[in-house]
Image (cartoon, helix red, strand yellow):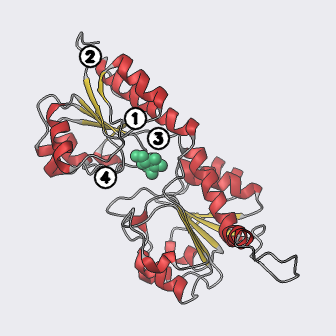
């Protein structure tokens, strides 16, 4: 380990145990106010730091990296997705990029199931009706949703999170279908009794529930385009806990508005934190503030991963969660 502690600039407020440990180990500059850094502050940070520890709310593009000082050798992202970082530009400048995969898988899968249940069973509408005082007693036909058991779930992206959703969904009695760049191993396919669809179009047209779990890359931008969204059946519901940019949000809002699909559960948005006003008006859209990984345990484990990545790099080893351009 170098004698000098590395200057680690953390762009947002992280859980207390993570910040405390960072102060012990590094010359860590924390952001106690939690105000997102503006461009000038980010430029200053990349100019001075050995390590930048950003989050999704920081745009680390090639122009910002032009301002990086000689010292900047690692961008240790707090989060799994790295679509806000120009990984190719960083790599070309000799700056390693790491992320925090694995530790948010189960929490994200839990919230995905919560959204499926919330939309299919109208949980938010029911809770709001009770709060508004409009529950006047049980009726045989009020608040009827759709049964989940026995339906078909189409999973787009069958990585760690997609598989964790599939395991839960199977226990709920859903039939598992998926679209992925390649099929999962025969062992996993058998365990999940999963059906692979090479053609996303074919799968979309046949599912009752569709859930998105791919990373956002140039190849997945608007993967659910206006054309593809129209393939969904009128009773279908669409869930997204991955990235807003994967769905054409305007086209989705219009489909919901016209009653052409039954509902949507969204934790992420194309122009986050701005949300399409049409979406906000849909009673059958359950909209959450990008909170799929927001558990105390998960956020501390994410911070621990950031620390491990920094320490390993300081010790001269390859950080365990290094992201390379060819992996995206
Ligand atoms: C994180 C996420 O909380 O990890 C991700 O990719 O989307 C979130 O759950 C966020 O990215 C923190 O930077």
Camera-nearest label, 4 or 3: 4
Residue beneath label 1, please?
Answer: 321
Camera-nearest label, 4 or 1: 4
In-image side of 21 versus 204 (left or right): left
Ligand 1 within 8 A of label 3's CB?
no
Q: Where does residue 13 sit, x and y in percent of width and height? A: 39, 38
In what element is the residue under mark 2?
A: loop
Relative to 7, residue 230 above or below: below
- On residue 84, the disc is 4
The first of marks 1 and 2 along the sequence is: 2
Residue beneath label 3, please?
Answer: 101
Give the distance between the C-alpha atoms of the residues marked 2 and 4, in whole angstroms. 27 Å
In what element is the residue under mark 1?
A: loop
Q: Where does residue 182 sit, x and y in percent of width and height? A: 49, 57
Taking the spot 68% from the left edge, 52% from the top edge, the residue there is 167
- Badge 1: how crowded within 10 Å, few (<14), some, or many (20+)? some
Q: Where does residue 150 sit, x and y in percent of width and height? A: 78, 69
In what element is the residue under mark 4?
A: loop
The first of marks 4 and 1 along the sequence is: 4
Pointers 3 and 1 in contact (C-beta within 8 Å): yes
The first of marks 3 and 1 along the sequence is: 3
Pointers 1 and 2 in contact (C-beta within 8 Å): no
Q: Where does residue 52 sit, x and y in percent of width and height? A: 27, 35
- On residue 5, the disc is 2
The first of marks 4 and 3 along the sequence is: 4
């Amino acid at each position: 380990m170098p004698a000098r502690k590395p200057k680690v600039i953390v762009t947002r407020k992280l859980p207390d145990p993570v910040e405390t440990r960072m102060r012990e180990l590094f010359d860590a500059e924390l952001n106690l106010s939690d105000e997102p850094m503006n461009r000038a502050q980010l430029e200053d940070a990349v100019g001075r730091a050995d390590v930048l520890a950003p989050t999704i709310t920081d745009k680390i593009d090639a122009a910002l990296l032009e301002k990086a000082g000689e010292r900047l050798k690692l961008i240790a992202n707090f989060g799994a997705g790295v679509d806000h970082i120009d990984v190719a530009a960083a790599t070309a400048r000799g700056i390693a990029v790491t992320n925090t995969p694995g530790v948010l898988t189960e929490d994200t899968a839990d919230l995905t199931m919560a959204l499926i249940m919330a939309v299919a069973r109208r949980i938010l509408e029911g809770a709001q009706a009770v709060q508004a005082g409009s529950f006047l007693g049980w009726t045989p036909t009020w608040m009827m949703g759709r049964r989940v058991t026995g339906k078909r779930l189409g999973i787009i992206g069958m990585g760690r999170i997609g598989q964790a959703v599939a395991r839960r969904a199977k226990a709920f009695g859903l039939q598992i279908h998926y679209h992925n760049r390649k099929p999962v191993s025969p062992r996993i396919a058998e365990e999940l009794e999963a059906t692979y669809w090479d053609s996303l179009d074919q799968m979309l047209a046949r599912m009752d529930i569709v859930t998105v779990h791919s990373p956002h890359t140039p190849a997945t931008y608007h993967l659910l385009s206006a054309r593809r969204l129209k393939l969904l059946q009128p009773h279908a519901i669409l869930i997204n806990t991955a990235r807003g940019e994967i769905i054409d949000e305007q086209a989705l809002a219009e489909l919901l508005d016209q009653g052409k699909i039954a509902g949507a559960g969204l934790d992420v948005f194309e122009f986050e934190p701005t949300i399409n006003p049409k979406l906000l008006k849909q009673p059958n859209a359950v909209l959450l503030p990008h909170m799929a990984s927001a558990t105390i345990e998960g956020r501390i484990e994410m911070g621990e991963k950031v620390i491990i990545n920094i320490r390993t790099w300081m010790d001269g080893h390859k950080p365990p969660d290094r992201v390379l351009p060819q992996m995206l």
